[in-house]
Amino acid sequence: MISLAEGVAPGSDGLFFSPHLGGRICPSSPDMRGAWIGVSWSHTQAHFAHAILESIAYEYAYYLKILTESLPELVLVEARVVGGGARSEVWNQIKADILNVPYQRLVGNEFGAWGAAMIAGKAAGLINDLASYAEETALLNGKPFHPIKENHENYLPLIEKYIRLEQTLNQFYRS
């Protein structure tokens, strides 16, 4: 599916996807369900695939907006990414463009176990500072995906549109 998304312009030609097939966690809305908005005859499978990838990145932008409203001093300078989605160059570029921060992949897969081991090491007195230790031991996988300024500027109004869309869908599913 991800390879289908290559070559589609930012914004998927007006196609939006709401990815909440089984409810929403943040902000909490357990009744929320997924939806396609803006579907037209001109949309191809590639547009649908691209819109799915964008929807997750829009969600991250929404979460970041919520966080920065609560913590104005918070500034995201880089995203370090792991897992299956991190393997996709197309998706990492979309996320970098939407969030306007570099997206850096890390080497490895078992980050849940790694984090648990670090916390155990801290509790046992073997690690003094978790943040420093994580920084020292995380191995970077290749070069970061830097945001493309033009793409980010194209995404800015779409992020706000997506947030309004999600708020409208939330009201719809609550009634």
Image (tube, rainbow, N blue to C red):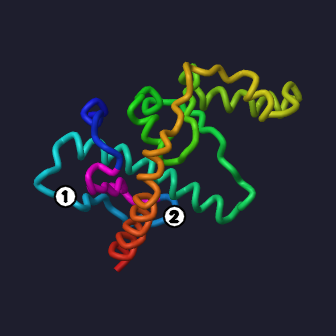
Question: Residue 19, position in %: x, y?
Answer: 35, 53
- Rendering coords of residue 81 (x, y %): 55, 33
Residue under circle 1? Answer: 39
Q: Which residues are magenta?
A: 11-24
Which amino acid does the dot numbered 1 rest on? Val
Q: Residue at x 36, y 43 (%)?
A: 53
Q: Which residue is mark 2?
A: 27
Choose top left, top right, bottom left or bottom right for residue 46. Answer: top left
Query: Residue 89: horizontal and vertical position, in percent?
Result: 42, 28
Given residues 152 and 144, the one toward you in this image is 152
Quarter occupied by residue 30: bottom left
Between 141 and 30, which is closer to the camera in this rendering? 141
Q: Secondary structure at mark 2?
A: loop
Give left or right: position of 170 versus 82. Answer: left
Picture residue at 57% right of the left edge, 36% below the top:
102
Q: Nearer the viewer, residue 100 or 70?
A: 100
- In the orientation shown, which residue stands out farthest toward the bottom? 175
* Residue 83 shown left or right of residue 104 in the figure: left
Instruction: Determine the CA span between mark 1 and mark 2.
Output: 26 Å
Q: Looking at the picture, does residue 29 appear above or below residue 93?
A: below
Question: Which labelled disc corresponds to residue 6?
Answer: none
Can you give x and y, in whole percent of width and height, for residue 34 in the image?
31, 58
Residue name at image x 29 percent, y 49 percent:
12
Q: In the rendered view, tell whether residue 22 sits above or below residue 56.
A: below
Give the amino acid type for the residue marked by disc 2 in the picture.
Pro
User: Going 68% across and 64% down the picture, which residue do you hit?
Assistant: 70
In this view, the residue farthest toward the front is 150
